[in-house]
Amino acid sequence: MKSITRRTFGGGMFGVLVATGLRPTSLQAQTPQDLIAREGVLQLAPANYPETQVWGYSGAVPGPTIRLPQGGRMTRRFVNELPQPGTIHWHGIRIDNAMDGVPGLTQDVVEPGETFLYDFVLPDAGTYWYHPHNRSYEQMARGLSGALIVEEADGGPEVDSDEVLLLDDWRLTEDAQIAGGFGNMHDWAHAGRIGNWITVNGTGDWRTTVQRHSRHRLRLVNTANARIFSLEAQGLEGWLIALDGMPLDAPQSLGRLTLAPAQRADIIVDVTASVGEEALLVNFERDGGYAIASFDVTAVARSERLDAPSPLPPNPVPQLGPLQTARTAKLLMEGGAMGRMDGAMMGGQMMGMREMAGAGKVWAFNGMADMPDAPLVAANRGETVRIDITNDTAWPHAMHLHGHHFRQIADDGTAGALRDTLLMDRGETAQIAFVADNPGDWLLHCHMLEHSAGGMMTWLRVV
């Protein structure tokens, strides 16, 4: 394995170099009840580069972390000061359908200069996040995202700190500005928009000071358009305790952790590095690993490590009913570069791939590009739903279901951990199942944002 490096910015290389922060300009926070989407500047690249023009929520990139108690009420007024219409999707929260933030399905877009009040109850503790759902492939690439943390009723596990780490990548030009080309068909038909600069919480060198044998909860959120992170802790040992906000039945020993776009992982780590050393969170690419977050060990917290943590309390997600009698559907993922799809239905007529690409669509579900008129599934409230998914493409996809959490069903019938986003590799098949307990029309789409915009979306109805 290649040694861990800190890469330099520029020339298409990834970088993790210099701590940065927002300049104290007009991008300062407004009233706590407002989330204002607007333009700003961020010293995103190292200090010898110009500041980057970004779009941010209420004075920060990432947006302000919202922390509220389980069972509490989230109320924020979205103010759109951007030159494009927008909405906010509250990713992973099982909320009222009207608050889900999907244009044309749950609400109208919020035009520039207009506002929208998001108001809903938080049923589940865990790590969630918020982001736009109109032109999200551009608006998120410019910086619009933030964390929503719902605190456990019992106060959560015993830790010395609770850190939220939003992982992102940016495609920057040589003068550190966000590159254009948001409708680039090469990106849309391949892996999506992959950046050349990695940040954690908006900085290329996120770091904090810790003590040996101290214990920390790290809430990891992949906010990138399309990048899949492959993470490993060094100088830190611990446990995986939750995925996509939902607690695991028992903490699992921490190993290599894959986070697809939109996925989250809560981990508890003990610092095992010695005083004067660095502990690291490392991302692995094909050509080796590089640090994206550093923990400088400056002292000793206690003489020995704490006992292993207990499981987090479960959230009130309904148990699956019998899969043999579940309402079923099939979802075939098609299209993209090096795929076998010749064309698909679009706008009520059959189109070839060349025509589809001319209209900005290169992917399909079940032979249909973009949103179909009829839902993939229409279920009664309380029914168990099973969806068989086949990835008949040459690319991975991160499938996200709105309004619900599902379990992946193994070949032997056992149910996996609750998730809201499932990474499916090329040629892979999977079966997911969930209880349709949340009424409304809910989106199901690929969270590689260029794939979604390029046709990979459908919807479900729960009545």
Image (spheres, grey):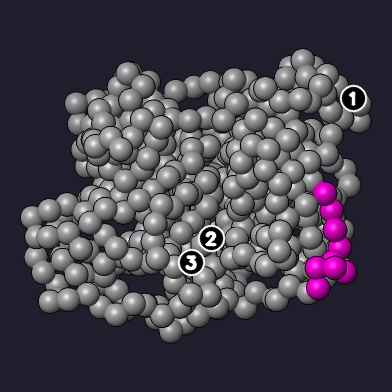
Q: Which mark is residue 244?
A: 2
Circle 1 SS class: strand
Q: Which residues are magenta?
A: 322-330
Give the residue type that dot 2 points to: Asp
In terms of depth relative to the viewer, which is nearer, 246 or 409?
409
- Give the residue at x 82% y 49%: 330
Q: Compared to 450, does 308 lie above or below?
A: below
Is 237 on the left-hand or right-hand side of 432? left
Q: Residue furthest bottom?
A: 154
The residue carrying pointer 1 sits among few (fewer than 14), some (14 to 19) or many (20 or more) residues within 10 Å by Cα, namely some
Tell me the quarter of the picture where residue 291 sits.
Answer: top left
Give the distance between the C-alpha atoms of the residues marked 2 and 1, in whole angstroms. 37 Å
Assess whether mark 1 and mark 2 are in contact (beta carbons under 8 angstroms).
no
Q: Nearer the viewer, residue 447 or 134?
A: 447
User: Mark 2 and 3 residues: CB-CB less than 8 Å, in contact?
Assistant: yes
Residue 380 drawn at (x, y percent) = 86, 68
Crowdedness near tag 2: few (<14), some (14–19) or many (≥20) residues, C-alpha within 10 Å: many
Q: Amino acid at mark 1?
A: Met
Residue type at mark 3 is Ala
Mark 2 or mark 1: which comes first in sequence? 2
- Who's the residue at 48% across and 30% down the image? 194
**Badge 3 is on which residue?**
242
**Considering only order in the chain, which callout, 1 or 3, is on the residue closer to the N terminus?**
3
Residue 24: which numbered mark, if any? Answer: none
Q: Is residue 398 left or right of residue 277?
A: right
